Image: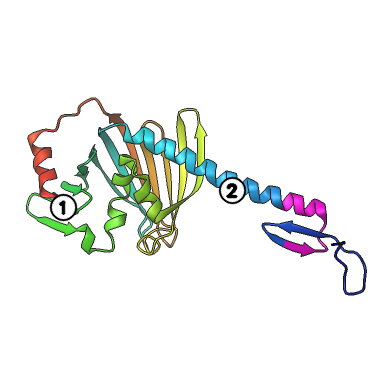
Amino acid sequence: LGLPRSPHGKITRMACVSGRCIEGINMKQAVVTLICLLTLGLSHSALADGFSSALQQLAAKPVVRAQFQQSKTIANSSKPMLSKGSLLFVKNQGVLWQLNSPVKADLVVTPRKMVQKTAHTQSVVNLKQTPYGPAATVLLQLMSGNEAALRQHFQVTQFKQNGSSWSAGLQPKSASMKPLFSRVEINGGAYVNKIVLFDPQQRPTNIVFTGHSSANNSLNSSENALFKLAQ
């Protein structure tokens, strides 16, 4: 077949990268480019594998109790809004947030509904009928180890392992998440220790979890009643 020639009759070199032949490219550059493409693929694979392992570790605990403290940056305010309370996660049921400060309230999130209850009021939201449904269930999907649901809305952009601790960065990719978050950062180990949610204006909401326990799997009558409200 012979070597390819330029319009002036000179022999030129061609390199094929990703199925495309590029005339006049330096062979060394072609090899470097190919290595970079392969490395990029391996990098995404490593991120996916690391995040999958972390989710499997979280999913191994059917019941988790913890304390939480939330700090939310508010537009046009020099001070963040602080709240704290306790959290109860029950696999195959949902998450119960019991707010103690600045007010007392219960918030139950299941795959189907979100219920907010105070001493005098109660509201129920069907999550399939609101665009905020996927956002309300982020922690539930995370602690359940529901990788398919998370990957439907997020891309894993960062994952680092340091001993038993890990950190992950998620980038919203679905139409329902992009208007709400610019990115999500998670730190954990055997449990989720911290979540930082950044809104589109890069204002963070920090949620820190402490005092984790998975020993007490039984729910009391009050907790069972709250979960029933969101069934």
Query: Could you say whether the residue bearing mark 1 is in a helix, strand or loop?
Result: strand
81 to 174, vertically: above or below: above
Choose between 185 and 205: the one closer to the eye. Answer: 185
Choose between 101 and 27: the one closer to the eye. Answer: 27
Query: Could you say whether the residue bearing mark 2 is in a helix, strand or loop?
Result: helix
Instruction: Point out residue 165 in the picture as x, y percentages from the top left corner.
Output: 45, 32
Image quarter hosting the N terminus:
bottom right
Instruction: Point out residue 182 in the picture as x, y percentages from the top left corner.
Output: 44, 58
Instruction: Point out residue 16 in the picture as x, y percentages from the top left corner.
Output: 74, 58
* Amino acid carrying mark 2 in the image: Gly
* Amino acid carrying mark 1 in the image: Val
Q: Residues within 10 Å of mark 2 (few under 14, many from 20)?
A: few
Question: Which residue bears the numbered disc 1?
Answer: 115
Q: Which residues are magenta?
A: 21-33
Q: Is residue 26 magenta?
A: yes
Residue found at the very far front of the displayed protein: 1
Q: Is residue 41 left or right of residue 184?
A: right
Q: Residues within 10 Å of mark 1 (few under 14, many from 20)?
A: many
Q: Is residue 199 left or right of residue 222?
A: right
Closer mark to the observer between disc 2 and disc 1 = 2
Choose between 69 and 42: the one closer to the eye. Answer: 42
Q: Is residue 190 magenta?
A: no
Residue depicted at x 22% and y 60%: 128
Location of residue 4 (image quadrant): bottom right
Residue depicted at x 43% and y 35%: 53
Question: Which residue bears the numbered disc 2?
Answer: 41
